[in-house]
Image: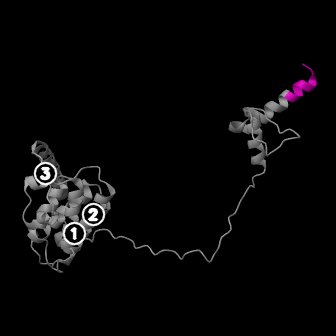
Amino acid sequence: MDNESEQNEYSDYSEDEDLGLLKKALYVELPENFDPNKIPSNGEEYLQKVMYEARNCPALKVAPVDSIKIKPPTKVQMIENCMKAPPSMLPSMSWQLETIKDFTKFRKFMSKELENYPNSKKKDNLAECLTGLPKLATVAALTQEDKIKVLETILSQLNNIKKGKPMATVEGVWIYSILATLEIPLCPDTCHILREVARKCSQIRSSLEKSAVEKDYVTLNLIICLIARFYRQLDLADE
C-alpha cells in the first residue's frame, strides 16, 4: 500500500471517528451533472436526491406571523380543590383509613352479588332512581354510563341545597352505592363527575353551622374520603 493510499484511508477513518454516531454508512457523492428534477431510479440516486435537498434546506425557517389574526389569550378558570373542613368537622386520618378498609370489603361484596344477580331491565327514566333508597335490582340494572348520569342528577340536586343545610340521606346512600359499583380504572368523564361531587360536598360541609351535629356532616366526610383516597384524587383529600 503506497503512502497516498494510507493517507486517504487514515483520513477517512478519522472523519468517521469524529462523526461518532453520525458516521457514514454509505459513501454517496453528488455527480457534477446531477439533475434534481429527475425521479430516482435506484437507491444511489435516491440518496443523492436526499443529499441535495438536505444541502438546500435553510438552517432556520421562520413562518410569517399575521398579528391581526392572533387571538387574545383565553382566560382559564382554575378549578379549586375541596374546601377545607372546619376543625370540628375534620375527619382524622385513622377514621379515613378505616373508612377505606370497610369500603373495600363492601365493594368486593357488591361485586359478587352483582355477578350472581339476574340482568334487570334498564330504567327508561334514571331520575326515578332517586325517589327512594337504592335497591340491588336497580343498581344491577345500571350501566357505567347510567351511573354517571345518576351522579350528574344528584350533583344538580346538591347545587340546590340551601346554605347551612345538610345533604339528604337518600342522596348520600345513592352516591355510596354508585361508588361501590363503579368500574376501575376510571374513564375521564367518571373522574370529572366524581371530583365535582367531592367539591360540592366540601362546599356544603363548609356552609354548615359550627354547631352542626355529626350526622349532618359525616356522610359528606365519607364521600370526600372515598373519592379522594380510594379513587386516588388525593389533591381533594382532607389532611
For the point 43% across and 73% down, the residue is 76
Q: Which residue does the numbered mark 3 point to in the structure image?
A: 140
Which residue is nearer to you in this view: 58 or 90? 58
Amino acid type of disc 2?
A: Ile
Asked if residue 38 can be seen in this view, the reply is yes
Quick one: label 3 or label 1, which is nearer the N terminus? 3
Q: Are marks 1 and 2 in contact (CB under 8 Å)?
A: yes
Instruction: Tell me if residue 236 comes above or below residue 22 in the rendering.
Output: below
Distance (Cα) linking label 1 and label 2: 8 Å
Query: In the rendered image, which residue does mark 1 sit on?
Result: 155
Is residue 161 rendered to the left or right of residue 190?
left
* Quadrant assignment for the N terminus: top right
Q: Residue at x 28, y 68 (%)?
A: 82
Query: For residue 48, what is the image quadrant?
Result: top right
Q: What stretch is highlighted in magenta?
A: 1-8
Which mark is in front, 3 or 1? 3
Quadrant placement of the C terminus: bottom left
Between 82 and 178, the one lying in front of the other is 178
Name which quarter of the figure residue 43 lies in: top right
The residue carrying mark 2 is: 193
Camera-side mark, 2 or 3: 3
